[in-house]
Image: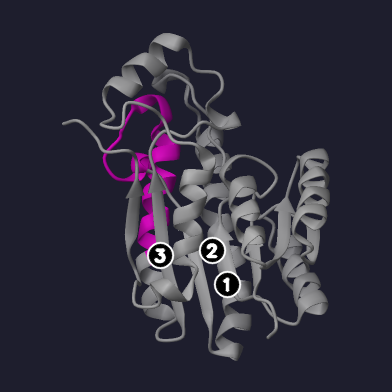
Amino acid sequence: MKKKVVLITGASRGIGKATAEEFAKKGYNIIINYNNSSKEAEELNKNLIEKYGIETLVVKCDVSNEREVKQMVDMSVDKFGKIDILVNNAGIAIDKPFEEKTLNDFKKTFETNVYGIFLVTKYVSKIMLDNKYGKIVNVSSTSGLDDFSPFSLDYNASKAAIISLTHDFAIQFEPHINVNAVAPGWVDTEMNKDFDEEFWREAKDRICAGRIAKPEEIAKVIVFLASDNASYINSEVIKVDGGKQY
């Protein structure tokens, strides 16, 4: 049986990296997308091949650039002949006080977090629809649902937009492609490394689990949603936040 192929955007670090490892454990062939972190992407690629013996493709691509996205999808299909699963994980956050936020901050955040998902999904879904099979998992955030802060209002708005896209994509691609989203709470990733101890202490006090998530805990939910065990789950947003104290 031919192995399934998964494309993970922003795969070189954090949730994307953990997701690549979880798929590799299950024998999937993996397309590792990155934009800036070439060293990390190559290290991940080497590790996955050595540990799991899968086939991989490493592609540098700015997901907000349509020409580069099309080229990435073409390269993927040339190598593997198909893309069965898409994990739209690439994302950025520009955290600063509200009064310092600029229109350019909003543009940059939305270009990666929202335009990127639209573009990659647009081109990958054509392949999936031709094959009458596909699973798409979008990485949103509880920041798009119920964790709001003016400090990151552009990020919050972009993650809410991802939830809207998830529902629209599910309708657009029915019945052949399942489209769902995960909404993680706080996760121990590079993106969150600059917050101080007091911030984390207060954040953990508001989480029923009493701690923040490990990237692999989010990754396992993504892999489940991309599996045939989740074949009747569609257009859903799954919170993975350890439980919130209200």
Mark 1 Cα within 10 Å, few/some/many (few <14, many 20+)?
Answer: some
* Residue 31 in picture, x, y percent from top left: 72, 62
Check residue 214 in the rendering and tell me which mark sits there, or answer none.
none
The disc labelled 1 sits on which kind of residue?
Lys
Residue where numbered disc 2 is placed: 118
Which callout, 3 or 1, points at the residue further toward the start of the chain? 1
Residue 122 is marked as 1
Mark 3: which amino acid? Asn
Q: Is label 3 in a helix, a strand or a loop?
A: strand
Q: Which of 104 and 1 is in front in this view?
A: 1
Residue at x 68%, y 63% (from the top left corner): 66
**Label 3, label 2: how far apart the Cα atoms are:** 14 Å
Quadrant of res 169: bottom left
Classify mark 3: residues with Cα within 10 Å, few (<14), some (14-19) or many (20+). many
Residues at badges 1 and 2 in contact (C-beta under 8 Å)?
yes
Q: Give the range drawn in magenta.
A: 142-166
Residue 94's place in the image compared with 65, above or below, is above
Q: Position of residue 102 (x, y in %)?
A: 50, 29
